[in-house]
Amino acid sequence: MQDIRTFALKVGREKIADTVGRTRSAVDNAVRNGAFPAAWFVSLRALGKSLDIEVSEEMFGWHRTKDANATKLVQGQDGKKVNERLTDAPQDQGAA
């Protein structure tokens, strides 16, 4: 698994900044903090793929939720991403 510092060294911080449409300073801050913003994931995954460089989900600061009705994105059996419930709590069906 690749860490954020190694990724930044291989790709270059200016290239990352250009790709995500942010400043070099924003990239420097993310590297210093140890995680890219989750909003950058799709862009950096595409960049990594184009350069044949691994982009690990662990390099991103994903928000965790405490919501009983929360879902997570998981790989379905058909290879597509699907939402899966995190709890067995009944979903709110709205007012009856």
Image (spheres, helix red, strand yellow):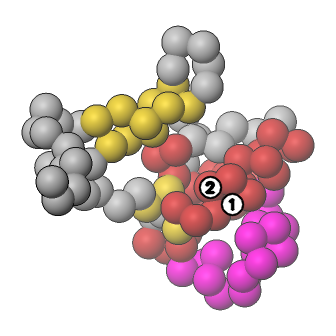
Mark 2 element type: helix
- On-image quarter of the N terminus: top right
Give the mark toward the camera: 1 or 2.
Answer: 2
Where's residue 56, x and y in %?
57, 41
Kindly identify which numbered label has been placed on residue 23.
none
What's the magenta bit mostly, secondary-structure-wise? helix
- As drawn, which residue projects farthest toward the right? 50
Of 41 and 23, nearer the camera is 41
Could you tell me if residue 8 is visible in this image? yes
- As drawn, which residue projects farthest toward the top? 77
Q: Does residue 28 belong to the magenta stretch?
A: yes
Residue shown at 11%/39% (left/top)?
A: 89
Residue shown at 53%/73% (left/top)?
A: 30
Q: Does residue 10 belong to the magenta stretch?
A: no
Q: Amino acid at mark 1?
A: Ala
Residue shown at 20%/44% (left/top)?
A: 91
Classify residue 64 as left or right of residue 95: right
Residue shown at 62%/55% (left/top)?
A: 41
Does residue 73 sit above or below 7 in this rendering? Answer: above
Q: Could you say which quadrant of the image residue 96 lies in?
A: bottom left
- Which of the two discs, 1 and 2, labels the residue nearer the N terminus? 1
- As drawn, which residue projects farthest toward the left? 89
Task: For label 2, count other residues whose C-alpha is less than 10 Å away and answer few (under 14), some (14-19) or many (20+).
Answer: some
| Residue on which disc 1 sits | 8
Classify residue 31 as left or right of residue 48: left
Highlighted range, magenta: 11-29
| Residue on which disc 2 sits | 41
Q: Amino acid at mark 2?
A: Phe
Could you tell me if residue 36 is visible in this image? no
